[in-house]
Amino acid sequence: MATAHPQNVHADDTRLDEDFSSHGVNGNTMNGNTGGIDKDSGDTLSRMRTAGSVNISSELFEKLYLSPENRVKGDLRKTFGNPTPIALVGFLLSLTPLACDLMGWRGAGGNGAASTGVFFFFGGVLMILGAIGEWIIGNTFPFVVFGTFGAFWLAFGATLVPSFNAYGAYVTDPEVAATMMGNPGNPAGLQVPAFNASFAFFLVMMALICFIFMICSLRTNITFFIIFLTLVCGFGCLAGTYFNLALVYENATNVAAATRASRCVVAGGAFLFVTSLAGWWIFLAIMLASLDFPVQIPVGDLSTMIRGASDKKKVSEA
């Protein structure tokens, strides 16, 4: 007389259904008539799928979390929702309008000043929350990426807010400063060479960290790699814009520097727009995969093509 073994419950749903549909409640046959209760039990148990009994492939894990599959202690990934999409929302809703502003589409401009609130509450808040979520579930790479860009959007937004006096502090002429009657954020600071050159160095450092992220993204997917590649180019162009503006404000007759600045800002906006397109693509891919949508879109998985050091070590020791 066969009985159902508790330790095999999570192993195979089909086998579990067969065990409960062919035996009585107490494990005994009932003259070939199991009754409705056994059928209902089998149907109910077949629907009891928990995160602990569902294994996802390395490719799907990388698509959902933008990180190669790694082992962490505990079951936090089964307890909390995936924080990756909400961080991407904050990134995309901040970057896409900024890219359009930099390119001057439909008369837009002002280096994104109209989106200052977006930079704070979408770019800053959502990406920081996403970073905390990634940290909780043990995903180091997206945690660092989202935390870095969350801080970037907060810093960029703060630079645009007059009360932070980021550019007003560069106004040293007492007569010019007097026009603001002691209030911070004197717009004359925007035309001081020192401010533009200093802000350019911040953008250079952002390009550098994106370059490091780009190298690391070779273990994730092609779309993520394109995001960082275009970010490196975009930040580089914007740094060139401010360096050339510093030259212009030193010498107003420097037409060549003014021309380079205008070209660099448009080029930077174009690169960031490509970044946005790749970001929207990967966001859609994650949402479709999260909902087990019947149609899935590829992101170009690289996690299995570029093997990790630990995987190579296992192969060499085998």
Image: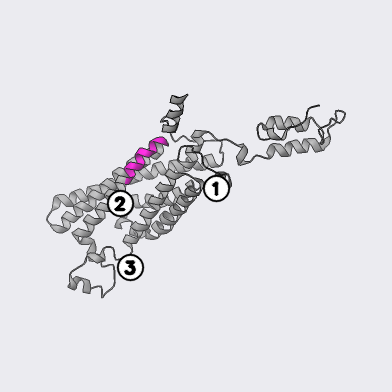
Residue at the outermost bottom position: 181
Disc 1 residue type (three-letter): Gly
Residue wearing tag 2: 102
> In the image, residue 219 lies at what x, y percent?
41, 35
Main SS, magenta region, reads: helix
| SS label for mark 1 | loop
Labelled disc at residue 163: 3
Residue wearing tag 1: 81
| SS label for mark 2 | helix
Magenta region, residue range: 209-221
Q: Residue at x 16, y 54 (%)?
A: 247
Is residue 122 found left or right of 159 in the rendered image?
Answer: right
| Mark with earlier residue (3, 2) | 2
Disc 2 residue type (three-letter): Leu
Disc 3 residue type (three-letter): Ser
Q: Nearer the viewer, residue 35 or 304?
A: 304
Quarter of the picture containing the N terminus is top right
Disc 1 versus disc 3: distance between alpha carbons? 37 Å
